[in-house]
Image (tube, helix red, strand yellow):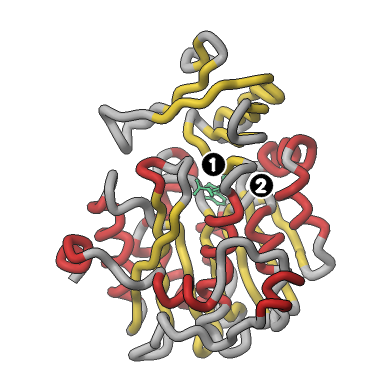
Amino acid sequence: MDSLKKNWFTEACELWPGGTFSFEVKEVLCDEKSEYQHVQVFDTTSLGKVLVLDGIIQCTEKDEFSYQEMISFLPLCCHKNPEKVLIVGGGDGGVAREVAKHPKVKQIVQVEIDAKVIEVSKKHLPFMAVGFDSPKLTLHVGDGFDFMKHHSAEFDVIITDSSDPVGPAVTLFQENYFSLMKSALREGGIVCSQAGTIWNDLQLVRSTLSHCRKQFPSAAYAYASVPTYPSGQIGFVIGSLTPDARFDVPTITFTKDEEAAMKLRYYNSEVHKAAFVLPTFVKYQLA
Ligand code: SAM
C-alpha cells in the first residue's frame, strides 16, 4: 500500500521508469498477497473498478473492453474456423467473455496460474468474470508454460492474456514458449499474445515479435488504444502456421446487428484492418 497516498493510487513499474499513472480511489475492495503476486482491487472515482497485480494496472471497468475484444477478435477473425481456443492467463475472465461470443467457437480451455485472481474477479469484477460462466469453458488453475508442454495439435487459436514480463509471466514472453504454442496448434492455427507498447517498450515488442517470427511463417504486430495502460496503447503479436497469412483481412465480418448482439464496443472489421497499420518509426524498428 506504499503507493496509495491521500486516496490516490500510483502505478510504478521497473518496465517504464521515470513516468507514472495515478487514479483516485474511493474504496479499497481487496488487498491480498497470493502465492504468486500482490492482488488489489479498487473502486475509483473515474475508472470504475480497477484490478492491480504487483502494482501494475491489469484492467479498468472504463476501458477493459478495448483490450479484451481486440486480443480475442483479432486472432479469431484471422482464422477460418476457430472451434477450439486456449486462453493462457486472463484470470479476470474478460477474454473468456469475448471468445465465447464468437459464433464459430465451440470449446474454450483456459489456464490461469493464480486462483486468487479468479476468486477476487468473481467477487469484485463480475462484468468480466461473467466469462467464467460460459458453458463452452473448461478452466484449469496452473502454469501456462507447463500446460503447453503437455498438449499437442489440439487448438485452433491460442490467446496469451498474460500480465507483463515480470513475476509469473516472464516465461510467456520467451521464444521457447512460442515453440511450445506452435506444437499445441492444429493445422492453420494462430497465436495471439499481449506484447507491450510501442512508446514505452519497443524493445519488448521487437523481441516478442522476433520470437514469434522464428517459430511461425507469418507474424505481425497489431495494436489498440487503452487509455489506462502505460502510454495509452497496447499491442499484440500474432503468428500463424499459414505462410503469407493476410492478418489485416478478417475471415469473417459481422453486420451492425451482429456486432450489437455480441455487445462489441471497440472491435469491428475496419478497426481490425487498421490495427495492423503501423506508424513509420515502428515499421522501421520491427522490419
Ligand atoms: N489485460 C492484462 C494486461 O495486459 O495487463 C492482463 C490481465 S490478466 C489478469 C493476466 C493474468 O495472467 C493474471 O491473472 C496472471 O495471474 C496470469 N498469469 C501470469 N503468468 C502466468 C502463467 N505463467 N501462466 C498462466 N497465467 C499467468
Q: Is 234 situated left or right of 104 in this image?
A: left
Q: Which residue is mark 1?
A: 58
Identify the mark at residue 67; answer none if there is no mark.
none
Q: Is 233 situated left or right of 156 in this image?
A: left
Would the CB of label 2 be found within 8 Å of ligand 1? yes
- At 61% from the left and 32% from the top, the residue drawn is 35
- At 62% from the left and 61% from the top, the residue drawn is 265
Q: Pick out the residue farthest to the front.
A: 256
* Front residue of 28 and 181: 28
* Front residue of 11 and 153: 11
Q: Is 134 situated left or right of 82 in this image?
A: right
Amino acid tagged 1: Gln
Would the CB of label 1 be found within 8 Å of ligand 1? yes
Amino acid tagged 2: Asp
| Relative image position of residue 166 (x, y in whole percent) | 41, 40
| Relative image position of residue 263 (x, y in whole percent) | 71, 64
Secondary structure beneath disc 2? loop
* Front residue of 260 and 193: 260
Q: Which residue is mark 2?
A: 92
- Compared to 204, does 42 lie above or below? above
| Relative image position of residue 262 (x, y in whole percent) | 72, 69
* Front residue of 6 and 87: 6
To which quarter of the image does residue 213 belong?
bottom left
- Compared to 193, does 258 lie above or below? below
Q: Is 273 situated left or right of 287 in this image?
A: right
- Compared to 238, does 28 lie above or below? above
Confirm or deny contact between disc 2 and disc 1 (CB under 8 A).
Answer: yes
